[in-house]
Image (cartoon, grey):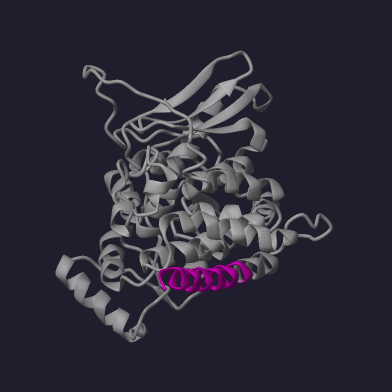
């Protein structure tokens, strides 16, 4: 996501400039990008054994290699680096961190009054009212970057909120579409990472295979657009050409259509000016070739094979800390799946167990949701998932014996 955003920026130097960059652990790429883009601030969450002096030396050598000046004025190192970078002066912050760890960066940008182009859906999902309140207090906006929510935002420009009947979020179906629950018992992590449409990281690709990602998108759509869960549907569309749809009360349905290319929703988000108007970026992505014969299909989600989607609806309706529990348990279970400690269907089973055990945290309407309560629920859910995985492994050993 970050490199594709840079593609959009460098292709439109008259529109965009990068003032700051933050990364996880890839300091070589960060330094190369910082020099090439003329960034003034950089942050590295996991610098390893590198201190500021090492990074400064890398910048000097990279500047000499590229024949460009080193413009970096400030270097942030450590777990809070991206949060401090997000709070720096900018017109818009693109948050593409994966997972709940992106919450504080989203809040830092919003509290600074900076619009957030949100690719880190988890921060909104787990933070919910906390994030929305931060945006409302500062006047900063959350601009969706996910292709599905960008599609909805574009289609919503055709009518008023009161004219919306429902939102329809499309899903590719992932690599295991059409498989039965029994067949899914034996799928491997390598198979889960072969997505039919998108090239993504391990967590998001696995989430797409389980439909957890689609569940997270349902919660995100509810929070972004204020539409009840009963009026948000998911439909499988394997060709991934229609990125989502809005059905209006008069029976008209508007869809945003394009070949799958994340540079388009990124450009749409970055092109949203500080006055709220969107100026489309010419040539952001290639359009459809309408001279080529093609067909598009749609089918319902198989909830028996992919129960994680229904679990997301459950978490979203519970609200409060339930979405944080859903997301945190999933992150631990996905890691365990790739380590060979749980099967593919056990990812959803473990999420269900966490919601069953911790859902008492959710409906306490008298409790005001805070960052601390969200992170506490996140921690409890991770602990519960780890205990559940250990128990599942022990039961499996007993079965083998």
In percent of width and height, residue 317 lies at 69, 45
In percent of width and height, residue 59 lies at 27, 75
Along the viewing direction, whichever of 258 and 53 lies nearer the viewer: 258
In percent of width and height, residue 380 lies at 63, 70
**Numbered marks: total:** 0
Q: Is the magenta stretch mostly helix, strand or loop?
A: helix
Whether 195 is drawn above or below 60: the answer is above
Q: On the picture, is 347 further left or further right than 340?
A: right
Q: On the picture, is 399 further left or further right than 356?
A: left
**Which residue is at a point 35% across and 33% down the rendered structure image?**
238
Q: Can residue 110 be seen in this view?
A: no
Whether 195 is drawn above or below 89: the answer is above
**Which residue is at a point 45% across and 42% down the rendered structure image?**
269
In percent of width and height, residue 11 lies at 27, 44
Along the viewing direction, whichever of 365 and 282 lies nearer the viewer: 365
Does the magenta-highlighted stretch encompass residue 8? Answer: no
**Which residue is at a point 80% across and 61% down the rendered structure image?**
367
Furthest residue to the right? 366
Q: On the picture, is 18 further left or further right than 148?
A: left
Q: Quadrant of the C terminus?
A: bottom left
Furthest residue to the top? 250
Image quarter of residue 70: bottom left
Along the viewing direction, whichever of 35 and 397 lies nearer the viewer: 397
Image quarter of residue 379: bottom right
Per the rendered image, the range of residues in magenta is: 380-401
Image quarter of residue 206: bottom left
Q: Can residue 372 be seen in this view?
A: yes
């Amino acid at each position: 996501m970050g490199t594709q955003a840079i593609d959009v920026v460098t292709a439109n130097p008259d529109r965009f400039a990068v003032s700051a960059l933050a990364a996880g652990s890839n300091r070589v790429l960060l330094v190369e990008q910082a020099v090439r883009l003329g960034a003034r601030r950089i942050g590295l969450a996991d610098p390893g054994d590198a201190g500021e002096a090492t990074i400064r030396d890398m910048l000097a050598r990279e500047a000499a290699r590229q024949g460009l000046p080193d413009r970096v004025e400030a270097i942030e190192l450590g777990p809070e680096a991206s949060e401090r970078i997000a709070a720096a002066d900018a017109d818009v912050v693109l948050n593409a961190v994966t997972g709940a760890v992106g919450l504080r960066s989203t809040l830092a940008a919003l509290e600074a009054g900076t619009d957030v182009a949100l690719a880190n859906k988890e921060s909104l999902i787990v933070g919910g009212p906390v994030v929305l309140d931060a945006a409302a207090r500062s006047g900063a906006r959350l601009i969706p970057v996910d292709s599905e929510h960008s599609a909805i935002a574009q289609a919503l420009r055709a009518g008023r909120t009161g004219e919306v009947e429902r939102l329809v979020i499309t899903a590719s179906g992932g690599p295991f579409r059409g498989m039965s629950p029994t067949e899914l018992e034996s799928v491997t992590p390598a198979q889960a990472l072969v997505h039919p449409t998108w090239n993504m990281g391990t967590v998001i690709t696995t989430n797409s295979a389980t439909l957890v990602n689609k569940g997270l998108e349902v919660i995100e759509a509810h929070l972004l657009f204020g539409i009840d869960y009963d009026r948000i549907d998911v439909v499988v569309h394997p060709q991934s050409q229609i990125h989502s749809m809005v059905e209006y009360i008069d029976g008209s349905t508007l869809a945003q259509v394009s070949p799958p290319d994340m540079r388009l929703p990124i450009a749409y988000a970055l092109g949203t000016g500080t006055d709220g108007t969107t100026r489309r970026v010419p040539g952001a992505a290639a359009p459809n070739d309408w001279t080529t014969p093609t067909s598009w299909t749609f089918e319902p989600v198989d909830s028996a094979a992919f129960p994680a989607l229904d679990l997301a609806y459950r978490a979203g309706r519970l609200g409060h800390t339930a979405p944080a529990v859903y997301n945190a348990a999933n992150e631990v279970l996905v890691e365990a799946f790739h380590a060979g400690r749980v099967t593919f269907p056990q990812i959803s089973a473990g999420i269900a167990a966490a919601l069953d055990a911790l859902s008492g945290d959710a409906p306490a309407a008298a409790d005001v949701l805070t960052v601390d309560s969200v992170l506490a629920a996140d921690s409890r859910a991770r602990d519960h998932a780890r205990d559940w995985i250990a128990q599942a492994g022990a039961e499996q050993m007993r079965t083998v014996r």
